[in-house]
Image (tube, grey):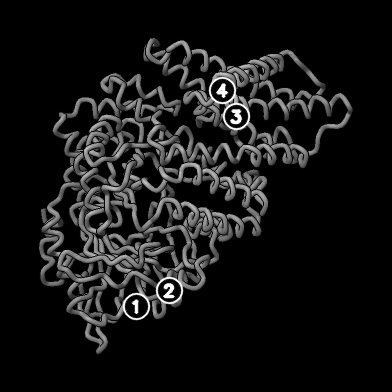
Amino acid sequence: MPSERIVMDILQERYELVIDRIRQIQGETFGQEVFEAYFKKVASFLLLLDDTKVFLENDGLKQAPLEELQARNEALYCDILPQAYEESYANPQVAVKRLGKEYGQELSWLYVKMRSLISDVYRGQLEDVVAGMELFAEVYAAFTYGAADGQLPSGKEIREILYWFSSDYADRSARIRVWEMVCPDATFEVDIIQNSDLSDVRFLYAYGEYVSENELETARYLAQLPQETINTMADTFTEGYRIGFEVTGKDLSVKKTAQLRYQLGFERMMKRAIENLEKMGLKPVVGRNAVSGGAANRQYQYDHKDDIALFLDKNYMNRRLEVLRTAFEEFKEDANGHAGPAVVETFGEEDFNPVNKPENIRFTDEQNKLWVEFLTKNGALTREYIIAEERSFTIIAFPVPAVGEVFKELFDETIRLNTLDYMLYRNVQQSIIDVLDTADYCEIRGMGENRTELKVNLWKLQDPAKETIFENCVADVNIPVGEVFTSPVLEGTNGVLHVTKVFLNGLEYRDLSITFRDGMITDYSCKNFDTEEENRAFVKENILFRHETLPLGEFAIGTNTTAYVMARRLGVEAKLPILIAEKTGPHFAVGDTCYSHTEDMRVYNPDGKEIVAKDNSVSVLRRTKPAEAYLNCHTDITIPYDELGELAAVKKDGTRIVIIREGRFVLPGTEPLNEAFEA
């Protein structure tokens, strides 16, 4: 085996050769002006990356003033910012218009791939930078040699070059992904958090991510908060993580790492969280896909979300799965010691209404099936090494300055939400559960413009003295407090779920309607686009995640009226993340149950009763047809209190016990929940 020094020398030699070739492109012509303009533009970007590499090697991050760091960051991302995107080759619409249908998608994909090298340059991943630049040089050579012979390469030939590059380097990509996720020596982000002056926002530019005013203002705001407040934020977060193991009877002491996921600007909170995790015996890991920079352009992200469809086939899918297993085998011990993610979400970003472009790369029907199959197998493979029954997680959310003038008040209110009296909620929620445990099914009806008419069938208890249907959810893995939830019985669950407007995973849905028959989705629609075809495709891609149907995996009643009233008062209802929004009314999750892959673990409520409603007729297939048991998705859809006409528990004899009527809790024992409405 060659020494590390020899390997680095070889990589550096390859780098010098390829970057020298790229420099020459600026002065070359090959008789095809349309394509020359493209290659010169991308070459110019790669030369900027080369300049950035030199800047980093000369310790520029520590020496450069803030203005220089901002200018460099702007230069790296300016081509995809909204004001420039309509003229950028990164825009498939522009690329197809200028370069033609035969090459537009492929060359737009190539430019986006080159843009992904920004992260590799900042991380010092020279092998990935070299490989990417060599790919660009190879495609350029195909055009120049083809032009010299009087015949440009076909789009199919270019696509094959991209395919084999992606296939050949899949092992490297998988190894980096797994290493960054589970290995304590993957410390790029952790080093930034622990070794930076977090009062100086220049540290934000060390990641290589886009830094907008939003991230700058977040970091500045957290920098001026009292340490006591930072401690409260971080301690609530990590204590939820610890309690998640405790309440499920999982042994945290045998775990070695926990993954932090966060948005740029929250490093001061993360520093305290790292200290807390280390006291639990856990080393923090992050990884490039676990830290989010500013959204330079969400339309750009939307345009390229399906880019893998450019060359997805059975062989490529199997190759991806094969190299992932190899990577997990290499880091098997680290994967086994991984405790799971601790996630800080953000909310308050500007609204985004995507534009569907016919030039975007899209999945064929066959590729849709392949992608669903890949995600299923990928999830199963990951769980084979990071065992679901032994890991946990926690999620908490905070607003960002983009929410507007209410930011500071909303931030303080969110801290208050995250630290509400869980004993109060536990007792109130128990009174709801006591009634639900006597019910045969629940009826949910909307009011006003909400057209919901839904019957949810419930699990039937065999031993009510020792068993319960609903979980009493307080602030542990799912912060803040405020819901009771169950896995409903699919058979006999029928009707329509409707919301006038809802934000799910950053996308807005208008007049979202989903029809269930025996717990399975049979129809769906929204009114985001002009045609029914576009609307159905939007729902299928982003809620059904390309499945033909999904089960109703969860039925829950949110009880956090404080969050609801706060959002109404500050005018941020549409900005709430699902983590908080799901607590502000009954919600219904399509996809897997909340107990996915842990159905056989015994779980108890605080009153000592065992939660037995964890399975449904889809998840139970894990015993006979495991490939059909899990969908690898779970999307919560909430009916807000002001759209809820009635939620009632119905007993076997037809007796109806109303829990919520016209947006207010009416069940005895739930009176404290209405106090927020009256404040």
On the image, numbered disc 4 is attached to which residue?
Answer: 3
Identified by mark 4, the residue type is: Ser
Q: Callout 2: helix, strand or loop?
A: loop
Work out how far the residue at label 1 is from the one at label 2, CA to CA, in angstroms: 9 Å
Of badges 2 and 3, the one in the foreground is: 3
Residue 675, image x, y percentages: 11, 58
Which numbered dot is residue 519? 2
Mark 3 lies on a secondary structure that is helix
Q: Are marks 1 and 2 in contact (CB under 8 Å)?
A: yes
Q: Which one is closest to the eye, mark 4 or mark 3?
A: 4
Three-letter code for the amino acid on which mark 3 is drawn? Met
Residue that mark 1 sits on: 457
In space, the residues marked 2 and 3 are separated at their CA atoms by 45 Å
Q: Which residue is mark 3?
A: 114
Left-right relation of 157 to 624? right
Against 512, residue 321 (above or below) is above
Local SS, label 4: loop
**Three-letter amino acid code of the residue under disc 1:** Asn
Going from N to C along the chain, the mark reached first, 3 or 1, is: 3
What amino acid is at disc 2? Gly
Location of residue 642 by image quarter: bottom left
Q: Nearer the viewer, residue 400 or 492?
A: 492
For the point 59% across and 49% down, the residue is 322
Residue 106 point in image, percent of width and height: 68, 38
Please identify the residue farthest to the right as the structure is shown: 150
Disc 4 to disc 3, C-alpha distance? 29 Å
